Amino acid sequence: MALTIMGIFSYYAVAAQNQGFAILWIAIVPAVAMLLLNFRLGFIVSTYFLLFLIVVFYTPLKGILQENIFTERSPGIFEQAFKIYYNETFVIRFPLLYACGFVTSLFLTAQKQYYSNQSDKNALYDALTELGNRRFYNDYVDSLTGKPVDRNLAIVSVDMNCLKTLNDNLGHDYGDRAIIDTAKLLVDVFGSYTEDIYRTGGDEFVVFFIDRNNELNSLLEKIETKEKEYKCEDVVLSVSYGAVKGIDYIDADISKLITIAESNMYRYKDNYYKSNNLDRRHDNRIKF
């Protein structure tokens, strides 16, 4: 389609079809091409016609075309067109008009693409932590559903400890800071291994990565080491986690593996609360 447009418009322009009026259609090329075609192809087509106008109107090729190409096929038609329909004022102004339209269309299309990308990002990423949100997580899990699970796939389910206590005692702003710090902690530990880190709920996170070098246990230990570096009003961040690896449950699908990781996380969380004499529902002490 793009090549057809380029060929037809080029011929009708240099042949001065319809008493030279045909070339005016080239002025709409940038807007139409970038709207109907994808941005890259529209840019290529628009750039072609910009160069086409410069070459035909401003360079010595104008004379070469007159003498060696069009005069042989249709004697005098190109030369006639320039003399009759493409006067000196038109030759100067039209390429400039096209260039202005090209730049304007390029700017508007790029701006539209930017806002479209931002809209897509807002739909898939959590505004508070900038991690993938629940929708992005669901899309990722759906992409793995019904397929054989990579034996090296590791899943880590993470849940913050005592977030309700922090919210009740210090306010939700501090709770939000703790959520952000948890996201930073996970990126700090797993960021060099994967981009598949999601905030799936208020204080819930899930990480997926391919563990080819059996580093899962060392990374889980790193969580416990690193969480001490994150504080909110002198309250040290604390998270519970549970993990699973595909090779440990060869016949399990992705849904089953996620369930196992969550179960391991809740087992860790129960032990945490019991060892600290905390009630998960009613305790109001800040003891992370």
Image (cartoon, rainbow, N blue to C red):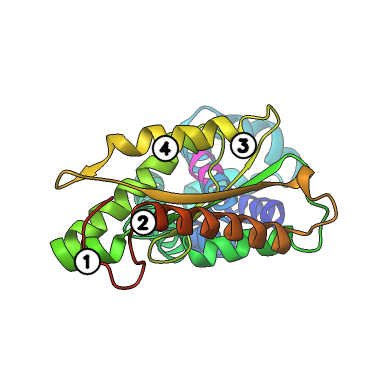
Q: Secondary structure at mark 2?
A: loop
Earlier in the chain: of badge 1 and badge 4, it is: 4
For this rendering, which residue is in front, 17 or 262?
262
Question: Residue at (47%, 37%) from the top-left corner?
Answer: 54
Q: Amino acid at mark 1?
A: Asn
Q: Which mark is residue 268?
A: none
How many other residues sit within 10 Å of disc 4, few (<14), some (14-19) or many (≥20)?
Answer: some
Nearest to the eye among marks 1 and 4: give it: 1
Residue contact at pointers 3 and 4, CB within 8 angstroms = no
Q: Secondary structure at mark 3?
A: helix
Horizontal relation, residue 138 to residue 87: left or right: right
Q: Amino acid at mark 4?
A: Glu
Nearest to the eye among marks 2 and 3: give it: 2
In space, the residues marked 1 and 2 are separated at their CA atoms by: 12 Å
Q: Which residue is mark 4?
A: 224
Image quarter of residue 236: top left
Q: Which mark is residue 161?
A: 2
Q: Which residue is mark 1?
A: 284
Earlier in the chain: of badge 3 and badge 4, it is: 3
Question: Residue at (42%, 52%) from the top-left corner?
Answer: 272
Nearest to the eye among marks 1 and 3: give it: 1
Residue 163, x across and y down, in percent:
30, 61
Q: Amino acid at mark 2?
A: Asn
Q: How would you classify the magenta stretch by its main secondary structure?
A: helix
Range drawn in magenta: 47-51
Residue 89, x across and y down, in percent:
34, 48
Nearest to the eye among marks 1 and 2: give it: 1
